[in-house]
Image (cartoon, rainbow, N blue to C red):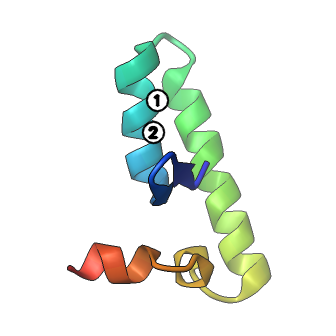
Amino acid sequence: MLALAEGFCTAQERIVDVALRYSVNELTTAKWRAQFALKAHFDAACGVNIYQLLPGLCERLLR
């Protein structure tokens, strides 16, 4: 959920990528909510925003 062919990405970037390639349907928003819940779970388990643990992601986002 946090990577594209070019490297690490945010959950939002991945969701948009998948939606553009495969379209959306009536289950899409529920899947998105579940993905954000998973990210929140791992943020809490790690004690930090997991984006900080992915090499190069924060630097790319701050450019």
Q: Quadrant of residue 50?
A: bottom right
Which quadrant would the C terminus be assigned to in this image? Answer: bottom left
Determine the residue positioned at 60% across, 31% down.
Answer: 31
Q: Is residue 57 above or below residue 35?
A: below
Camera-side residue: 6 or 61? 6
Which residue does the image show at 57% across and 17% down from the upper left?
27
According to the image, label 1 marks what residue? 18
Q: Nearer the viewer, residue 14 or 49?
A: 14
Location of residue 60 in the rendering, given as x and y in whole percent from the top left corner? 32, 75
> Where is residue 58 shown, x and y percent of the image?
40, 80
Question: Foreground: 13 or 32?
Answer: 13
Q: What is the three-letter code of the residue carrying label 2?
A: Ile
Q: Look at the picture and state if 17 lies above or below 49.
A: above
> Where is 15 relative to 38, above or below?
above
Query: Is there a contact, CB below 8 Å, between mark 2 and mark 1?
Result: yes
Q: CA distance from mark 2 to mark 1?
A: 5 Å
Mark 2 element type? helix
Give the residue furthest to the left. Answer: 63
Residue placed at 49% from the left, 53% from the top?
Answer: 11
* Residue sticking out furthest to the right: 45
> Residue at point 50% right, 46% down?
5
Q: Position of residue 14 (x, y in %)?
A: 46, 44
* 57 to the left or right of 47: left
Label 2: which residue?
15
